Amino acid sequence: MGRYNMVRILLADDHSVVRRGLRALFEVRHEFSVCAEASNGRDAVELVLHHKPDVAILDISLPVLNGIEATRKIRKEAPETEVLIFTQYNRENEIRNVLHAGARGYVLKSDADEHILGAVEALARHSVFFSDDVSEILLADFFGQTGLGNNTHQLTSRERKVVQLIAEGNSNKKTASVLSISVKTVETHRCASMRKLDVHSTAQLVRYAFREGLVQP
């Protein structure tokens, strides 16, 4: 860890409100110190080289230099700094890309309150940390590559819940209310589920839910 056993953190997100929220979470804990902030990927890399934080928290969609390229540069030029991706996206290709670039953690912004502190602690020990949904995606990817998986494994727990609620006849708005997420997020999970399952209508999605036991007839 950093000096005096304090974990030194760099925050990189193009939204100042996100950086303020993260800083507030860390500042109430004596073992964390935010040593720098950046609003784009290029500045994040430069600040990492200057401040040598233990953990750099990067959004994947940073301007100027995106989070994937920034991660690659940080891990090459400052290998003592671990990279934690903090983003709203859980798309499989982006998860794979940042892991290949050298990130050792991936936390969804929707999981911040529950996971961000533990994630930083894990990376400061040079361990790994992933949000539950991300872990399921990685496992599904593994099972798919090894031929051990089935269609159910392809969906994250949140995607399965969205499919279940839709199959039960709930609208996107009602599903969003039940899960305490936005309608846009419901639509994102719905589209992701249909793409993974190779179905092209709500009727096909409902049939899948009944076939897999997500909904009882």
Image (cartoon, rainbow, N blue to C red):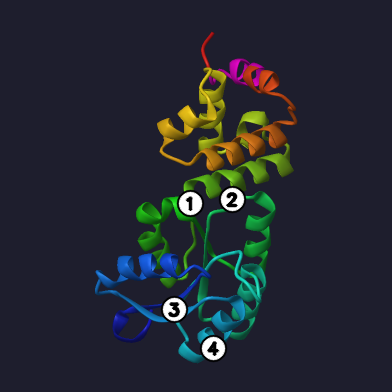
Circle 1 or circle 2, nearest the eye: 2
From the top left corner, tell me how far across and down residue 26 is, in percent: 32, 69
Q: What residue span does the magenta drawing correspond to?
A: 207-214
Which of the labelled discs sits on residue 90, or is there none? 2
CA distance separating discs 1 and 4 = 27 Å
Q: Which residue is mark 3?
A: 54
Q: Which mark is residue 49?
A: 4
Q: Residue at x 51, y 24 (%)?
A: 165
Q: Which mark is residue 161?
A: none
Instruction: Name which quarter of the figure residue 137 lies in.
Output: top right
First of labels 1, 4 by sequence position? 4
Mark 2 vs mark 3: give the one in front: 2
User: Image quadrant of residue 148?
Assistant: top right
Q: Amino acid at mark 4?
A: Leu
Closest to the observer: 67 or 202? 202
Horizontal side of 154 relative to 27 (left or right) equals: right
Say which label, 4 or 3, has the lower sequence index: 4
Q: What's the distance in space between the residues labelled 3 and 1, CA to CA?
A: 20 Å
The amino acid beneath tag 1 is: Ser
* Residue picked out by circle 1: 131
Q: Which quadrant, please, contains the C terminus?
A: top right
